Amino acid sequence: MRHTPPPRTYRVKSFGCQMNVYDGERMAELLAEQGISPAPEGEEADLVVLNTCHIREKAAEKVYSDIGRLRREDGTAPLIAVAGCVAQAEGEEIMARAPSVSMVVGPQAYHRLPAMIADAVEGRRVVDTDMPAETKFDMLPARRKVGPSAFLTVQEGCDKFCTYCVVPYTRGAEVSRPFNDLVTEAHRLVEAGAREITLLGQNVNAWRDESNRGLEKLIEVLAAIPELARIRYTTSHPNDMTEGLIEAHRDVEKLMPFLHLPVQAGNDRVLKAMNRSHTVDSYLRILDRVRAARPDIALSGDFIVGFPGESDAEFEDTLKLVEQVGYAQCFSFKYSPRPGTPAATMDGQVPAAVMDERLQRLQGALNASQLAFNRHSVGTRCSVLVERQGKYPGQWLGKSPWLQSVHFTADAAIGDLVEVELVEAGANSLSGRLVQ
Ligand code: SAH
Ligand code: SF4
Ligand code: F3S
């Protein structure tokens, strides 16, 4: 490797889940602290961090084309760091396949980026996929400037080992951040401009503090921060949905009426093969309790179609479940075999054409459900947190309490919390009218 001048500008590109977005922001803050500035729009950066996702094959393969695209006409490239879950899973392979990459850093080691950059500048390529005992959170600079809706990682990692999933391998075991650190970071986020905080974790509702208090306690304490208007959390696992957390949906006004609770499939045999350790019925009973606590709650989930061995009839059970629940929004995916996971070598891998057809039918049902939910909101008044400007002059975009995208035209500013009446609904957004 060649020597390069120390980078003066950076760009961080994050893919995958919200936790990667959070990590991407924290890496950016870390680079800024080193005196490296964000590259201006449209200009090439001296240092590019690709913060990658390994969840499905398409996401994981994308990193190689992204690396290729960074090559300049004269054959050189900026300093490239590959971070995130592909880095963790395929560290050495990336180094072998992509000679222009000089740094590979896993999700638990990115606080070491400054030292890695120093190596890279000297022409040394470095892979760091340790899961060190020291936590990155203690090494990162404090939060400075954030948008009105901010993320806060409270829990990381997963011990559930669903048979299709790479996350337990890429993010490591479940670890909860300490209570006081989180309260401090939440205060910093609010001082930096946040009016809404979304607590993040791969299994966020598995968060426990040092004295075994659950997420509802953290939510209760954060709700007492006066300038913080809204609290959300994601992603939850059905088995960690405690009574205390369900009651928080009844008792804490700032906790938004939205629950993302992935179920993956609507058939018990498939759930068992996935190692989900809940049944369709136990999942539905949780939803009943949540709805009893907060009747207007919007429900969301994730689905996988074409898990190995899934029959037509078993897939139909997923459609029935969707019909029964009435989701406000959902994510759905074709099963993607991931190296090293038990499901990848199971019998009965489902042909691509069958998966395509199932996904299309499922997405049709989910879109209909989402549209019905949105139409049902028309005529109601709600708060909207303004997140950005719309396409047209004077138009603003924000989120309702139920996480619907709402646009409206009025005098407003980013970060405002306004009261609107919802007047028209599409599948993906609603239009609102400002209430004086
Ligand atoms: N921790 C969260 C999110 C995990 S990843 C949870 O347990 O819900 C987000 C979603 O990606 C999963 O919920 C699942 O629906 C999907 N997913 C994970 N692995 C997959 C795979 N191998 N193929 C297709 N979809 C997958
Ligand atoms: Fe993956 Fe299952 Fe863990 Fe979610 S609970 S991150 S799907 S292993
Ligand atoms: Fe992807 Fe890693 Fe998130 S695999 S979904 S970036 S935890």
Image (tube, rainbow, N blue to C red):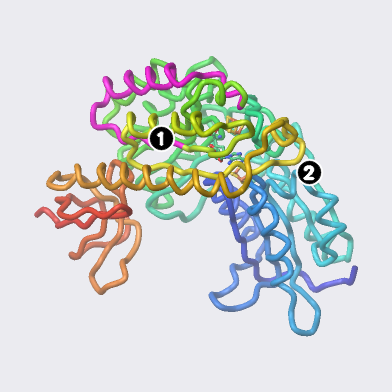
Which of these two is toward me, 276 or 28? Answer: 276
Quarter holding residue 274 = top right
| Residue hosting label 1 | 319
Mark 2 is on which residue type? Thr
User: Residue 300: within the magenta?
Assistant: yes
Q: Is residue 380 left or right of residue 193?
A: left
Quadrant in the picture for the C terminus: bottom left
Q: Which residues lie in the magenta part?
A: 274-301
User: Residue 66: within the magenta?
Assistant: no
Q: Residues within 10 Å of mark 2 (few under 14, many from 20)?
A: many
Secondary structure beneath label 2: loop
Instruction: Identify the mark at residue 129; answer none if there is no mark.
Output: 2
Which of these two is toward me, 292 or 171? Answer: 292
Q: Residue at x 19, y 44 (%)?
A: 377
Quarter holding residue 5 = bottom right
Q: Position of residue 226 (x, y in %)?
A: 30, 38
Q: Is residue 134 left or right of residue 29?
A: right
1 or 2: mark nearer the eye: 1
The Cα–Cα distance between marks 1 and 2, rounded to whole angstroms, is 40 Å
Secondary structure beneath label 1: helix
Q: Residues within 10 Å of mark 1 (few under 14, many from 20)?
A: some
